[in-house]
Image: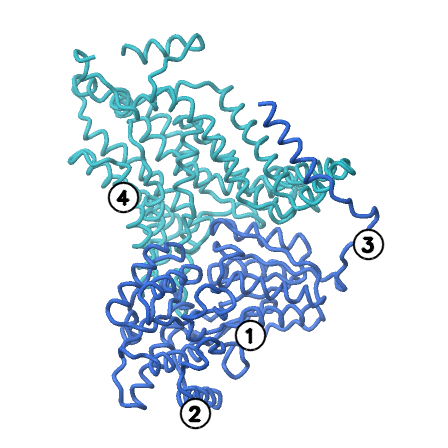
Chain colours: A blue, B cyan
Amino acid sequence: MRAIAAIGALAVAVTACAEPPPANEPGEQSKSDFLACMVTDEGGVDDKSFNETSWNGLLKAYEAGTIAEPKYVEPKSASDYEPNLKNMVRDDCGLIVTVGFNLAEATKASAEANPEEKYAIVDFLYTDPKTFKPTPIDNVKSLVFNTQEAAFLAGYLAAGQSKTGKVATWGGMKIPTVTIFMDGFYDGVQHYNKVKDADVQVLGWDKKSQDGQFVGDFSNSTVAKQLSENLISRGADVVMPVAGPIGESAAVAAKDAGGVSLIWVDTDGYKTLTEYRDLLLTSVVKGMDVAVEETVTATAQGNFSNESFIGTLENEGVSIAPYHAFEDRIDEKLKQEVDELRQQIISGELKVESDAAF
Amino acid sequence: MSENSSNELTIGQRFFRELTTGGTALTLLSILLAMLIGGVLIVVSDPDVQETAAYFLSRPTDTLLAIWESASSAYAAMFAGSVIDFEAASFGESLIPLADTLTYATPLIGAGLAVALAFRAGLLNIGAQGQILIGATLAGLVGFGMDLPPVVHLGFAVLAGFIGGAIWGGIAGLIKAKTGAHEVIVTIMLNHIAALLLAYLLTTQLFRRKGQAAPISPFVADSAALPRFFADSRLNLGLFVMLLAAVYSWWLLSRSTMGFRFKAVGHNPHAATTAGISVGRSYTAVMFIGGGLAGIAGASQVLGTESYLSTSIAGELGFDAITVALLGRSSPIGTVAASLLFGALRAGAVTMQAQTGTPIDIVLVVQSLIVLFIAAPPLVRAVFRLKVRAASPMAAEVGGKV
């Protein structure tokens, strides 16, 4: 016992004898005192998906010095949304960013009760229950994304890359922010088939019946891996998992199988999935960080507007990531076609539709 | 051993017996100890403390100040978020935290009773989550899908919640009674079925809000809404419905014949059978009634607190309910008290996270520790067949002979 105590004391002594900082240190001071706050959904701020990307937008604004150090709260269940927002209002946040449709009603209620406060909500657009037209709230800005446009390019690219004539996608849950990726991907493949008179099949999603393969949540990586293995064994050699953190299971399955490439979603997977860089064909990027950063910067400068931000290929709110490791493995002609398609979508010549689009 | 083998009790049955014989002092000390350990965790996880600890030997005052600052501000924020906020603008507003505590406690009471009643009959009801979900689904459907006159509509919606939960609980009880399948397995399965069923229903025309792609239901009609008491809080009439449920449970357990049968079955099913009590029927009945109370908890969520259905309507309520019932030692009044404590911890945690940045998970740890301290000693005694000494000779007597 004494020996353990002595070792413990030594450890304390070793780790505890660093130099103290000078008294009265000036401390880090951001140039701005504008406080931006975020209420995540239940995924939490480190979900490797939309919460994290949105939070990164606030961090970028902080690093740029346009806002003070931002803060966030993570609800544990739907019952926490309302008290969380109440706390944020009381803490004098200049802008409250909420993430996801789950928070839509709580955000609306809080915004109506506090007309002086400003809000931004990621991935949700308020609509009239009868006319289905967007009905913006005076002090809430919606940040939404026509992700299907970028996913369309990824689908076309996947079809062009596939050797087996089969590509696949699967989702975490069957919710609009997931199926919008799958719709675009599906249409991209169909467009390839039409143009090239080919017959590339999409496994895991059927746009017409709006039905496909889903894990059922965003946390069960075992099911996610089984699903991926299943699709690969049915012949798919390009897989696009739309499932936040558990999408990584598809990377594991692809690596095990060999000869299968991957399309990542939300962010450029080349930066986050460092182990699987070699498998990444591209990523369908949804620029939530950019949108949040722009919104908070404008608000800090006194230029808040409740006009919705709709991310498209045109305003680069959505895009496909550089090909990185696949730069040399993709046919130049295919790359050109993808670029042309991008132009056609931007010019409006080609319309990519989805039930979940805005 | 062999001659009284028919009277042998399972570990689970011994555990329940041990659990319900503990004293109030043990409960209070467990809470205190858990809060202390929680305080240590808050301090250790605080970056300021970590930073100043690096030069502890050179300037210890910094660390000590940081420790004090960290723990005291976190617990002060918890108090301000759950009881009284002295910094609020008016007296009315300073009591809002208390209303938040009661709001969080409301569904826990019903769900906790569902678990507690089953405990009394010797069943482990892990299925409160599913019972809440189905109760909320049916109550919501009546709430937004039907057009009825005010009071009738509300009554009917709450009744639908009861029926939904009761059916879901009753299924588990019936399967246990008819086939002997373990209720833990069955209720866990039913939880998954309920969650997936609701997720599916929210994609259908019947449940999805018009013009909305997200899986959320329309708002419940005003005529079916549980009235709220204050403008700034979601506290609603559901609290009194839940308290009525607690009074009913008390009456059921201590004044009714049916409750007597439940307890007899829970105490010793073999003896109960010998005395002419149908064990199977008691299992089904207790799960039916308990499930119904959890269903009303779901109804109070959708008709009062949230006003619409979503997949996260039940949160983790059904699992917190198990802890609440354990902490409340399976008595109705204990369950109400435990729900209030958990409601306060939850309301306080939300404020603590916002004000001090302390992770909300600390509160989960505190909750779990409380239950661990309370449930572990009886469990150890049950597993190793230890008898309680001196403290309660009666209990030892009962445990030894019957």
Query: Which residue, given by chain and number where applicable, does mark 4 sit on?
Result: B168
User: Which of the 4 image quarters holds residue A248?
Assistant: bottom left
The residue mark sitting in front, 1 or 3, is 3
* Labels 4 and 2 share a subunit: no
**Secondary structure category for the residue under label 2:** loop
Query: Which residue, given by chain and number where applicable, does mark 1 sit on?
Result: A308
Query: Which residue, given by chain and number where applicable, does mark 2 sit on?
Result: A349
Real-space Cα distance between discs 4 and 2?
A: 54 Å
The residue mark sitting in front, 4 or 3, is 3
Crowding near pointer 1: few (<14 within 10 Å), some, many (20+)?
Answer: some
* Labels 3 and 2 share a subunit: yes
Determine the chain carrying the residue at label 2. A
Say which amino acid is labelled 1: Ser
Residue A68 is left or right of residue B349, and the answer is: right
- Residue A26: mark: 3
Inspect this view and state whether residue A126 appears: no
Q: Residue at x 32, y 91 (%)?
A: A195
The residue mark sitting in front, 2 or 1, is 2
Relative to B75, residue A193 above or below: below
**Secondary structure category for the residue under label 1:** loop
**Secondary structure category for the residue under label 3:** loop
User: Which of the 4 image quarters holds residue A196?
Assistant: bottom left
Say which amino acid is labelled 4: Trp
User: Which of the 4 image quarters holds residue B284?
Assistant: top left
Real-space Cα distance between discs 1 and 4?
A: 43 Å
Task: Residue A18 in the image: state x and y as whole percent.
Answer: 74, 43
Q: Identify which residue, A231 or B284, lies in the foreground.
A: A231
Q: Are marks 2 and 1 in contact (CB under 8 Å)?
A: no
* Labels 1 and 4 share a subunit: no
